[in-house]
Amino acid sequence: MKLGSGFNSFTQELCIDHAVVRAEDSKPDVTEKALDQAGVAQSVAYKTSIIDKVTDVTDALNINAAFTVKYDKLNADGHGGLMNTNTIKSSDMSFMISVKVVNQIIMDHSLTKFVPINGLRPNNFTSIYGDSFISGFQEGGDFTALISVKVSDREQLESVKAEAKLAFTGDKLQLTGDGDIEKSKKDFLAENETTISVSWTGGGQDLKKPNEDWTWDTMRAAALKFPELVAKTAMRTHAILTKYAALKSFQSIGPQYSPLSYEHAGNYATALQEAYLDYKNIAKNIQVLAFDVVNGTQNLTTKAFDHKDAAENAVKASKPALLASMTVQGGSNPSERPNDSASSDEDSFTAVKASDAAAGSATKASNHDSENTTLKDVQPLVIEAPYPPTIFGLEAARVHCRFMMNRIVSELTPSSGGCSD
């Protein structure tokens, strides 16, 4: 990352270099040395929490939903694979310790001259320039530790979760003593499938002794000493972004360029991220189930399908004519409801029939649509019958999961304008 480079704040992607430069008669206006000489006055945020969904982790890591979906990782600096979204999604509970330390903010206020490209088409502006430029950096450190647990005894799931929450986040006075707390933690981590992930930026190498394992206690101790270590060894953790619209030089070139605005797209993108991870987890489980069926360790049976009406109503509710008649209370007025014919209802969704032939054709059609059709223009996919209890049925279900994942990726692509205001 360099000062003056273009940046897409939605996908967190770097764009063109030298999108904004210093004016010819200006001098660099950076306050880094003055702050170093004056000492370190830190801003520290410490948090211990129980994670309910993956987006809680991405929020703590300051990673946008669009970046997570597009690149399928939880960090932008190359070590995001250490925190796997599948592990968090499939676990029964996760505990996170996060520490954010800011030593100083370095800003270059002399970056005021926007550099346009002659002949650039307005619809290509966002892909080339993004919606903002890098005008400074935060220096400090980030520490994130995550424990994901999958309970071995499914019958004791709720009681184990309650005991774990008490042991890791409850008040010490709620138990008989510190010894019981430590025993409860050790038993809990030893008796269940546990995944520990730790990552940090800044702070050096003295968080713990080299021969110590990462446990809840070592993670907590490292988090408590992390701000002191960051005061000695800091790194650039985040870029400071400034909108192009804030530049007088950008406004002076006229209204030919209009960067996309993403201020109100965050909630929608987060919802799509959760749906994407659900489809991804389902597709993975289907693949494992297919291996078990081939090896003869699992058998497939047809299950009664009781949600056809709910699926059809969900598709009908997305029609603009019906949305216009919704009342303030969230319902709809039957007298104002559009009179849709049976033929129009059938055309409003894509159905999946319960046969091997249909499963094979659905697989081919889905693959064909993904290559030759704009995904945003495809009608909603509604499953009106169970998949056939065969390998072909499993493959059709997995293809439909991939199809929906591709639709979500397409929706979160800035060039499509799906999440822009």
Image: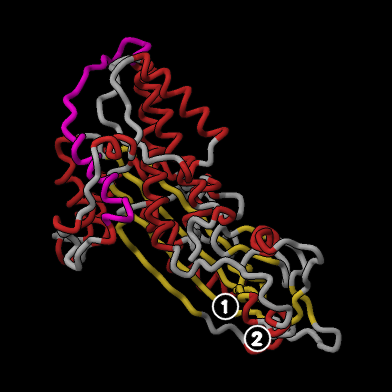
Q: Evaluate whether residue 209 shows in this view.
A: no
Answer with left or right where residue 277 lies relative to residue 139: left
Query: Where's residue 157, x and y in %?
Result: 18, 41
- Residue at point 53%, 59% (across, down): 200
Are there few (<14), some (14-19), or many (20+) residues within 10 Å of tag 1? many
39 or 389: which is nearer to us? 389
Residue 34 is drawn in which quadrant? bottom right
118 or 14: which is nearer to us? 118
Query: Where's residue 380, x and y in %?
Result: 37, 41
- Residue at point 51%, 46% (across, down): 410
Answer with left or right where residue 395 lies relative to residue 329: right
Residue identified by numbered label 2? 35
Q: Secondary structure at mark 1?
A: strand
Are there few (<14), some (14-19), or many (20+) residues within 10 Å of tag 2? some
Residue 297 is one of the magenta-drawn residues: yes
Query: Where's residue 63, x and y in %?
Result: 50, 59
Residue 282 is drawn in which quadrant? top left
Provide the residue span drawn in magenta: 293-322
**Which amino acid does the dot numbered 1 rest on?**
Asn
Check if mark 1's residue and mark 2's residue have beta carbons within 8 Å.
Answer: yes
Residue identified by numbered label 1? 103
- Residue at point 53%, 57% (across, down): 417
Query: Where's residue 398, x and y in %?
Result: 40, 28
Residue 276 is one of the magenta-drawn residues: no
Answer with left or right where residue 15 lies relative to residue 356: right
**Which amino acid does the dot numbered 2 rest on?**
Leu
- Residue at point 22%, 44% (across, down): 313
Q: Is residue 84 above or below residue 108?
A: above
Q: Earlier in the sequence, mark 1 or mark 2?
A: 2
* Alpha carbon separation for disc pair 1 and 2: 9 Å
Q: Is residue 319 above or below residue 108?
A: above
Q: Secondary structure at mark 2?
A: helix
